Image: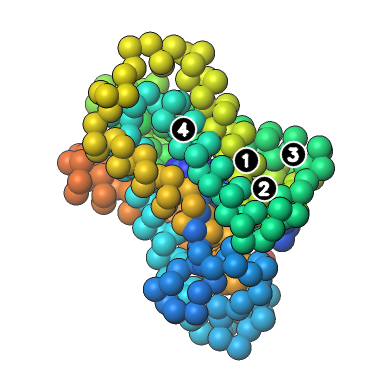
């Protein structure tokens, strides 16, 4: 998933996580990319974005007028920096599906994902050490193992499968399929003994109904069915990784944790790519300029800038507001896919996507009232 990673897609909304999000680790999601998105600052200027989050301790700056943080932000006027950070998460994470689709035109899927996450993870390690000092990277063996496991679930299992699927399905359809992640998280919470609420169950049913409609292009032969099923498998892996991340020991610094996850997940993607023989016949000279540009965009904007923005938002804005990315990203992805790649918006994609987004809205609104 795009930022499904650290970009990849897309992290699972914090409002849907079991209990309040830990300060040491932001909830994650596929897309998208994504895995884990990068680059948000706690800057004072609306256009500065969230990148400054690396320059101060999480939560040090409140982006809601008159509030000290998310807990006291309810009912307050949302400030310019929050809207700027939300815009980054909305647009950048939504665009990572398009970036993935362009990257895999001439670069093998798992090798492209692996290169993206290893580079982004190492860059984040360097930035954390530079801005916060080497001590911010300290972690116990148990924390490192946990971060590696979460990274493999999110970036190899979640985002990696989405990247593979986008060799066979349109980027907009992949984003709509990934949007069902919050529904899987509700199912996992229920299996763990929690009671998410009647509205959340209704959202799950809507999400599954939308998922059934979205599979119709594959059943009719318009889209390869294996690609659709691969994305669905990726959403399950992303959900398990997101759900697990708040229940196992993780590195104290959220940026360090995300860096370790990206490196582990990236190495996992590279190994799977080599195991699949993606290196055979692959020549760097054959990679198109479009694919190089897409990969650079995914590393810098998808895995660094959007991620930092998301982490900053988790400490500076109400979770119910941050969680809205879950139903904005798919819309952005579908529009960009249609406008830039000429992807067809068929009736199953339109209807199924609308049902999935409605289900996510219901889940988020239910969690907001709880």
Up-down relation of residue 303 to residue 191 (above or below): below
Q: Nearer the viewer, residue 301 or 150?
A: 301
Rendering coords of residue 28 (x, y %): 59, 48
Reading the image, the residue beneath label 2 is: 257
Q: At numbered mark 1, what does the secondary structure look like: helix, strand or loop?
A: helix
Residue in the image at 71% along x and 50% along y: 137
Circles 1 and 2: CB atoms closer than 8 Å: yes
Q: What residue is disc 3 on? A: 144
Cα–Cα span, label 4 and label 3: 21 Å
Mark 2 vs mark 4: give the one in front. Answer: 4
Residue at numbered disc 1? 261
Would residue 293 be found to the left or right of residue 59 on screen? left
- Which comes sooner in the sequence, label 3 or label 1? 3
Callouts 2 and 3 close, C-beta under 8 Å:
no
Question: As rendered, which of 128 and 272 lies closer to the eye?
Answer: 128
Where residue 115 is drawn, which disc sits there? 4
Residue 91: horizontal and vertical position, in percent?
36, 58
Disc 2 and disc 3: Cα gap in Å? 8 Å
At x 51%, y 13%, the residue is 275
**Residue 105: image tag:** none
Q: Earlier in the sequence, mark 2 or mark 4?
A: 4
State if disc 1 and disc 4 touch (CB < 8 Å): no
Placement of 210 over or under 362, stated as above or below: above
For numbered disc 2, what is the local secondary structure?
helix
């Amino acid at each position: 998933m795009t930022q499904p990673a650290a970009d990849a897609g897309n992290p699972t909304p914090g409002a849907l996580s079991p209990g309040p999000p830990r300060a040491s680790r932001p909830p994650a999601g596929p897309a998208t990319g994504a895995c884990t998105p990068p680059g948000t600052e706690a800057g004072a200027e609306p256009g500065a974005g969230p990148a400054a989050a690396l320059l101060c301790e999480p939560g040090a700056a409140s982006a809601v007028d008159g509030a000290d943080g998310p807990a006291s932000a309810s009912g307050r006027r949302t400030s310019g920096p929050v809207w700027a950070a939300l815009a980054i998460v909305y647009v950048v994470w939504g665009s990572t599906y398009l970036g993935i689709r362009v990257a895999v035109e001439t670069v093998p899927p798992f090798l492209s994902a692996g290169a993206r996450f290893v580079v982004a993870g190492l860059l984040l390690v360097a930035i954390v050490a530079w801005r916060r000092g080497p001590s911010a990277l300290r972690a116990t063996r148990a924390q490192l193992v946990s971060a590696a496991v979460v990274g493999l679930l999110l970036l190899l299992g979640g985002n990696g499968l989405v990247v593979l699927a986008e060799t066979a399905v349109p980027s907009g359809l992949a984003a709509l399929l990934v949007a069902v992640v919050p529904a899987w998280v509700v199912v996992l919470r229920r299996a763990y003994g929690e009671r998410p609420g009647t509205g959340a169950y209704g959202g799950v049913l809507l999400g599954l109904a939308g998922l059934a409609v979205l599979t119709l292009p594959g059943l009719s032969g318009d889209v390869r069915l294996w690609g659709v099923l691969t994305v669905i498998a990726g959403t399950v892996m992303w959900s398990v990784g997101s759900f697990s991340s708040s229940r196992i020991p993780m590195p104290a610094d959220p940026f360090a944790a995300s860096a370790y996850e990206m490196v582990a997940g990236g190495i996992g993607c590279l190994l799977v790519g080599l195991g699949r023989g993606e290196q055979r016949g692959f020549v760097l000279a054959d990679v198109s300029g479009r694919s190089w540009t897409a990969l650079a965009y995914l590393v810098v904007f998808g895995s660094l800038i959007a991620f930092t923005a998301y982490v900053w938002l988790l400490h500076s804005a109400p979770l119910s507001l941050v969680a809205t990315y879950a139903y904005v990203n798919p819309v952005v992805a579908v529009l960009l896919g249609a406008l830039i790649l000429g992807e067809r918006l068929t009736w199953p994609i339109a209807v199924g996507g609308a049902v999935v987004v409605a289900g996510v809205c219901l889940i988020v609104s239910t969690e907001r009232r709880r």
